Amino acid sequence: MRDRRLLGSLAAFALLLALPAVVRDTFFLRVSTEAIMWIGLALTFDVLAGYTGYLNFGHSAFFGLGCYTTAILMVRAGWPFPAAAAAGGAAAAVAAVVAGLPTLRLRGAYFAIATWALARGIQQLALMMTITGGPDGMRLPPFLDPKFFYYVMLGVVGATFFLLWFLLERAPFGLKLKAIREDEQGAKALGLNPTLLKIQAFVLSAVPTAVIGGIFAYWVTFIDPASTLGDLVSDQALVMVVFGGMGTLIGPVVGAVLIFAFKTVFWAYLAEYEVLYVIILGAAIAASVVFLPNGVLGELLYRRGPRKPAASEPAAPVPATSGKAEV
């Protein structure tokens, strides 16, 4: 099953690579670029939320850190974009280690509140510091090439997906994170180091998020604390992961595509009913939590799986044997 999903993912990636050659519409290319960006943000959010069991409401902190690091190095220091974006990822890795050491000692709502406070603190710093432009934000040098940003975003998100596939689905690292999620004390009794593993998961979630943020900053050419360090990134990533299915890699992709498609269609035709969008989205998430607790992907897999016999159904008869134990 996992091999089939991997082959399907490779086929989808190949189709996305060919998309700009088939579709010439610039607007559609920009929408596709943003959709890929949200897939990446949902995937990185799920590293902590789905595999480790920690809801990170400070996900936007690393996205904004990548945005501002890239912008500051390009505008103030004259760095080229690739080096600035890589520096944003390195800054996020350091921030994840520093912030993770105290916050990952907490669990549940306490960890969620602590990471939310982290994002708010970084947002306040961005509002007060002159190097970030304060509340007025920053402008980056424009580079008007939609195909460039499409391929760069696709390359980073695609590399992130396949790296996470190997680490979380094939390597022992994913099983260790799931052991912490299910029973941290039991995992420690088995000889695992939960603190080190959680820090590694935090860094694995933060670095691609920051690189995606750097690409976003150069793409839109203007950033401010409200758009990059606000609650939108964390909240929408959470919604996509919950709706698609936590603890999987395909689930966040499905959730991101469905939620982003709904958002795009809604704002295209019903932009004046902003409150209605929040109501519909909230109702959809509440319904999915009640009726689809494992997300859309989990429900599909459950329906395709073998049906368990009802309590009233007689069990299948056990074939008689000759009395000898079978090896």
Image (cartoon, rainbow, N blue to C red):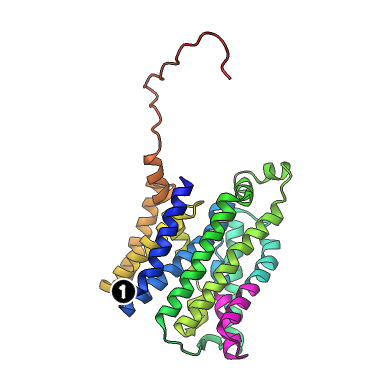
Q: Is residue 114 left or right of residue 148?
A: right
Using the rendered image of the protein, determine whether residue 10 is visible from the camera's viewpoint. Answer: yes
* Magenta run includes residue 20: no
Kindly state the secondary structure of the residue where label 1 is placed: loop
For the C terminus, the quadrant is top right
Q: Is residue 180 left or right of residue 155?
A: right
Residues packed near mark 1 inside 10 Å, few (<14), some (14 to 19) or many (20 plus): few
Q: Decide if residue 266 is on the left or right side of residue 152.
A: left
Q: Quadrant of residue 86?
A: bottom right
Location of residue 251 in the rendering, given as x and y in whole percent from the top left corner: 44, 54
Above or below: residue 89 compared with residue 325: below
- Residue at the outermost top position: 322
- Image coordinates of residue 120 in percent, x first then y, are 57, 72
Q: Which residue is mark 1?
A: 23
Establish if 49 lies above or below 83. Answer: above
Q: Amino acid at mark 1?
A: Val
Look at 60% across and 87% down and name the residue there: 79
Q: Position of residue 263 (x, y in %)?
A: 34, 67
Q: Is residue 159 above or below residue 225?
A: above
Q: Quadrant of the N terminus?
A: top left
Nearer-the-camera pick, 19 or 80: 19
What x and y, as percent, mark residue 32? 38, 71
Q: Residue at x 32, y 78 (%)?
A: 27
For residue 229, say whether it is visible. Answer: no
Magenta stretch: includes residue 82: yes
**Between 53 and 24, the one nearer to me in the picture:** 24
Residue located at (52% from left, 72% from top) = 212
- Give the magenta part as a residue range: 64-91
